[in-house]
Amino acid sequence: MELTHATVNDLLARLVPGHGPLYLPDTLDRQELTCLLADRYGAPRTLVLDGFTDPTVDDSKGAALLLPFEGRAVTIRAWAYGDQWIGTGTARDPEGTERLVLVAAHRAVPAPPEAARNGDEDEDVDWLERLKHLTGWTRPDRRPDVDWAETESRLGTALPSDYRRMVETFGEGAFDGFLGLNQEPWTSLREDGLLIWASTEHENLYCWRTDGDDPDRWPVVISSSDGEEVPFGCQTAEFVCRVLVEPHHPFTMAHFFDTHWFMTYREDD
């Protein structure tokens, strides 16, 4: 059986969260399957390695994927995707034979706070903490030691503090697998007074209008694929929160997923 993206699509279509694993043919290549899923869902989290379960695994990290195996999992890696966990690896079947498996489970993330859903104004909101809450983010900070002094010296400007915290917390990846977070701003629109902090596959560029000396007061501006500039009167983390959950936001992602996540592009250490 030749493993292709079409094959993966077929296998995923057969998965029913909570209905047990799919035991796959031995002719499938485990590493290739993992790589194809990583291309789709980002870097996986390792739940079980060589029969040993990560002691930190709980419901927020995909523990539901392990329940069908009843302690027989050998190696399981997991991805968050909307309201599902997807897992693959090897486990022993009820007869004791180690086999390649694919499994899905329901993923729950706490409902977004009312202020984020309804656009309520609250100057005391920590939008980065709210963003972690919305995405169910439980991993340690991915890039806690970024040398911002060097980056800002090279760019010739200070950067918004909530953006710096976002990079330190989430690292390389994309919100809902769609809005890619730049690890440092792109300067290709600098002559227009814009720095680009994120982008999407639709070629929309998420920027700041660099007016004034205080970057924490720079507003977000979207440079759309058709060349239009759309300003928003908020900062970076607040903007992402609102894009995720407000269905009437002009750049909303709320129509696609009720449960949100951050797709990380790098494996756990």
Image: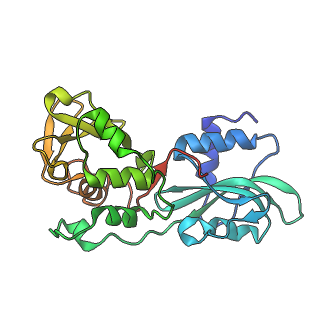
Q: Residue at x 10, y 41 (%)?
A: 211
Q: Nearer the viewer, residue 48 or 92?
A: 48
Image location (x, y in percent) of residue 255 = 32, 54
Image location (x, y in percent) of residue 84 = 52, 60
| Residue furthest to the left | 212
Q: Residue at x 42, y 47 (%)?
A: 146
Q: Is residue 47 above or below residue 154?
A: below
Count of numbered circles in the view: 0
User: Is residue 34 among the parts visible in the rendering?
Assistant: yes
Q: Quadrant of the N terminus?
A: top right
Asked where in the image residue 126 lies, by quadrant, the reply is: bottom left
Image location (x, y in percent) of residue 223 = 20, 35
Would you say 210 lies left or right of 33 here? left
Q: Nearer the viewer, residue 174 or 91?
A: 174
Q: Is residue 255 above or below residue 26?
A: below
Would you say 48 lies left or right of 110 here? right
Image location (x, y in percent) of residue 240 = 29, 54
Asked where in the image residue 33 lies, by quadrant, the reply is: top right
Q: Nearer the viewer, residue 156 or 41?
A: 156
Q: Is residue 124 above or below residue 36?
A: below
Q: Residue at x 48, y 53 (%)?
A: 142
